[in-house]
Image (spheres, rainbow, N blue to C red):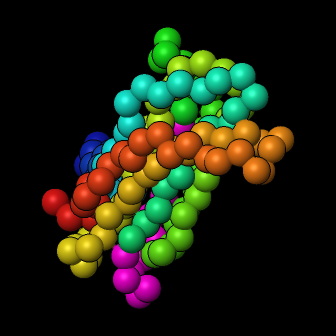
């Protein structure tokens, strides 16, 4: 009788342990499944900034007002590929953001766009531009250097 009781207790313990492991694995599995996020890129080629000039990297989300916003990681890279300036922004439809940097050299602009994995309107795009001007002299015309990511569709597979 003692032997049967010990066998039953051991079996119950094993069943409880296995049940707990199953519940824990299920909970972890539920947390591991990420939401679908689409990543797109807006990039430019190399451009030059002279002494006394400031570069402005601009990004804009063109989308209808009822759509959700998007998160954009804006970066400026020097010619060697090192990040010299960065800014993380969340844009609502119709909004724009700017990243400024002031130092002579050659740079390229890059924006990583994280968009919810839903289908939005066909006009939903993130575009970027680069302007260079003199921060100390507002009478000097701004140079429009380049545009990046024209007609890059985000939020659609």
- For the image, the number of numbered tags is 0
The residue located at (46%, 75%) in the rendering is: 93
- The answer to whether 107 appears left or right of 28 in the picture is right
The residue located at (73%, 39%) in the rendering is: 134
Q: Does the magenta stretch include residue 109?
A: no
Q: Residue furthest right?
A: 136
The residue located at (37%, 30%) in the rendering is: 45
Q: Where is residue 78 in the image (x, y as percent from the top left)?
A: 54, 20
Q: Is residue 65 magenta?
A: yes
Q: Position of residue 97 (x, y in %)?
A: 58, 58
Q: Residue furthest top?
A: 80
Residue 120 in view here: yes
Residue 112 in view here: no
- The answer to whether 32 appears left or right of 92 in the picture is left
Seen in the picture, residue 67 relative to 6 is either above or below; the reply is below
Q: Give the residues drawn in magenta, as a range.
A: 63-75
Residue nearest the viewer, comparing 145 with 100: 145
Dividing the picture into quarters, in which one does residue 82 lie?
A: top right
Q: Where is residue 15 in the image (x, y as percent from the top left)?
A: 29, 53
Q: Where is residue 138 in the image (x, y as percent from the top left)?
A: 77, 50
Residue nearest the viewer, comparing 122 with 20: 122
Quarter of the C terminus within the rendering: bottom left
Seen in the picture, residue 138 relative to 125 is either above or below; the reply is above
The residue located at (56%, 43%) in the rendering is: 143
């Amino acid at each position: 009788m003692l032997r049967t009781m010990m066998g039953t207790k051991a079996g119950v313990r094993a069943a409880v342990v296995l049940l707990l492991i199953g519940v824990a694995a299920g909970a972890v599995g539920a947390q591991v499944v990420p939401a679908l996020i689409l990543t797109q890129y807006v990039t430019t080629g190399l451009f030059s900034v002279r002494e006394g000039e400031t570069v402005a990297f601009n990004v804009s989300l063109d989308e209808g007002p009822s759509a959700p916003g998007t998160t954009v990681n804006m970066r400026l890279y020097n010619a060697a590929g090192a990040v010299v300036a960065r800014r993380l922004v969340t844009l609502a439809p119709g909004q724009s953001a700017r990243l400024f940097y002031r130092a002579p050299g050659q740079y390229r602009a890059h924006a990583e766009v994280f968009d919810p994995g839903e289908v939005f309107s066909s006009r939903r795009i993130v575009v970027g531009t680069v302007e260079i001007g003199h921060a100390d002299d507002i009478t000097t015309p701004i140079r429009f250097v380049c545009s990046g990511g024209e007609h890059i569709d985000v939020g659609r597979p």
